[in-house]
Image: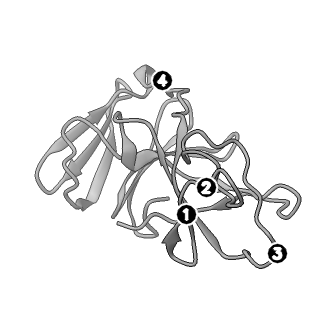
Amino acid sequence: MPSDIVTGIAEDNEGGLWVTTAGGVVFFNPENRAVTSYHQMKGYSGSQFSYVTSYKARNGDIYIATQGSLIRIKPGLIRQANFTPPVCITGISMQNKPLAIDKGNGPVKRSATMTEAISFSYRQSSFDINFAALTYAAPEGVQYAYMMEGLDKNWHYIKKIM
């Protein structure tokens, strides 16, 4: 959820819940407990939602009021995009210093964008990896997670800094 502050809830004809929060609109599917955040919606400019925000019309459309506009959602027409943007490593640093390409003894043998594997000595246990998802469609909707093979059993989701 983009925010813990819920300002309104409307149930659609299929039993899904459209939730307005202080941080945006969320769809909750109670069948599989999936949550989908909608950061970019036509007519939604990021303004705060009113406290009486959600209404379902007889035809099934959901109306959400913001302080500056009225948004209509046609739940039956929304399709989930199944696009996962490619992720590119843009830099590698050790002790807050970017690692230079060193074909001899250094851990980075070529450009970070072309490196498939990297090995560090036990003395090089603190490093940073910079990366970016290659998408312009809705970059604020990208969620990053990482797992170090052989060390982690679960994914670590990265909190967004805005």
Q: Are marks 2 and 3 in contact (CB under 8 Å)?
A: no
Give how far apart the Cα atoms at labels 4 and 3 are.
48 Å
Of callouts 1 and 4, the N-terminal one: 4
Horizontal relation, residue 118 to residue 127: left or right: right
Give the label, 1 or 2, closer to the camera: 2
Tell me the residue that label 1 is attached to. 99
In front of the other: 10 or 101:
101
Give the label, 1 or 4, closer to the camera: 1
Give the label, 2 or 3, closer to the camera: 2
- Mark sitting on residue 102: 2
Give how far apart the Cα atoms at labels 2 and 3 are.
19 Å
**Furthest-left residue in this view:** 68
Q: Tag 3, which secondary structure?
A: loop
Give how far apart the Cα atoms at labels 1 and 4 are.
43 Å
The amino acid type, in three-letter code, at marker 2 is Asp
The amino acid type, in three-letter code, at marker 3 is Tyr
- Mark sitting on residue 79: 4
Q: Are marks 4 and 3 in contact (CB under 8 Å)?
A: no
Horizontal relation, residue 54 to residue 116: left or right: left
| Classed neighbour count for the residue bearing mark 1: other residues with Cα under 10 Å, few (<14), some (14–19), many (≥20) | some
Of callouts 4 and 3, the N-terminal one: 4
Horizontal relation, residue 60 to residue 129: left or right: left
| Residue occupying the point 69% across, 40% down | 31
Q: Are marks 1 and 4 in contact (CB under 8 Å)?
A: no
The x, y position of residue 84, in whole percent, is: 55, 33
Of callouts 1 and 3, the N-terminal one: 1
Q: Tag 1, which secondary structure?
A: loop
Tell me the residue that label 3 is attached to. 122
Of callouts 2 and 4, the N-terminal one: 4
